[in-house]
């Protein structure tokens, strides 16, 4: 897999949470908006899956009737990261399949593995550590939701940090139609990870090049097939 870059989304793709919904991330966002702006259930009606933290924060501020300028967005995200850290003391994330094994095998075959997530960089680090995956990914090879609001821009940034080549073969691994759209926008292949029937239907309808149920050998095989296509 020479000159192949594989970019992992996190929530719903490499990570899922223990216990009932809402998960730790949405819970932290709701708590922050209640504390900062007096808005209960701030994420209700806002699609978080496939979103980016800056865009989600801006949408919540709009819902609260508050200013949406960059300083207000940053204030929400700073408070969110602090709140998330506390929540993860009692509610943890876990890998979706053999994430560590898949990353190691992809790298052994010559691929460069990175992260393309809507999470802020600090939020991503907290979630990965919670799932025991903090040593699996190199945080410097990533694009994050604190850096851009559009997922395609995050994917593009992550790819540039993984390869100095002008046009490497890029494979995006994600769980929503937004990952598929972002991959298409940058000319990437897309492997969908579907941990539910609804996710499988969404990814298939969006045109993912392959759809699997969890990270592991199936993911490695799908990436290998696409890399030589």
Image (cartoon, rainbow, N blue to C red):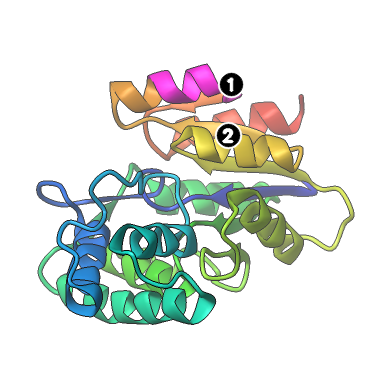
SS category of the residue bearing label 2: helix
* Location of residue 44 in the rendering, given as x and y in whole percent from the top left corner: 23, 48
Question: Taking 182 as reference, is 113 above or below it?
Answer: below
Residue 77 sits in which quadrant? bottom left
143 shown above or below 219: below
Based on the picture, tell me whether residue 203 belongs to the magenta stretch.
yes
Give how far across and how far down residue 50 sits, in percent: 44, 45
User: Residue 76 appears at what percent x and percent y?
Assistant: 35, 75
> Which disc is residue 207 wearing?
1
Q: Residue at x 72, y 66 (%)?
A: 161
- Cβ–Cβ below 8 Å for labels 1 and 2? yes
Question: 102 or 201, which lies in front?
Answer: 201
Q: Can you identify the residue that label 2 sits on?
A: 180
In the displayed structure, would residue 8 be above or below residue 208? below
Residue density around tag 2, few if under 14, some if 14–19, many if 20 or more, within 10 Å: many
Numbered range of the magenta stretch:
201-209
Task: Name the residue: 43% across, 39% down.
Answer: 216
Picture quadrant of residue 60 = bottom left
């Amino acid at each position: 897999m020479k000159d192949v870059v594989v970019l992992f989304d996190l929530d719903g793709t490499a990570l899922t949470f223990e216990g009932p919904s809402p998960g730790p991330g949405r819970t932290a966002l709701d708590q922050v908006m209640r504390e900062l702006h007096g808005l209960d259930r701030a994420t209700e009606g806002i699609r978080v899956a496939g979103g980016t933290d800056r865009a989600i924060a801006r949408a919540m501020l709009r819902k609260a009737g508050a200013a949406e300028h960059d300083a207000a967005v940053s204030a929400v995200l700073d408070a969110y990261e602090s709140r998330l850290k506390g929540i993860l003391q009692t509610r943890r994330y876990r890998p979706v399949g053999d994430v560590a094994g898949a990353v190691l095998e992809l790298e052994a075959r010559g691929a460069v593995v990175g992260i393309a997530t809507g999470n802020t960089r600090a939020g991503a680090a907290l979630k990965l550590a919670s799932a025991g995956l903090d040593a699996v990914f190199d945080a410097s090879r990533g694009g994050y939701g604190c850096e851009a609001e559009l997922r395609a821009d995050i994917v593009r940034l992550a790819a540039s940090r993984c390869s100095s080549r002008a046009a490497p073969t890029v494979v995006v691994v994600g769980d929503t139609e937004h990952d598929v759209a972002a991959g298409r926008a940058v000319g990437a292949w897309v492997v969908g990870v579907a941990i539910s029937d609804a996710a499988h239907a969404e990814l298939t309808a969006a045109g993912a090049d392959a759809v699997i149920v969890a990270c592991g050998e199936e993911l490695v095989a799908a990436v290998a097939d696409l890399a030589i296509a």
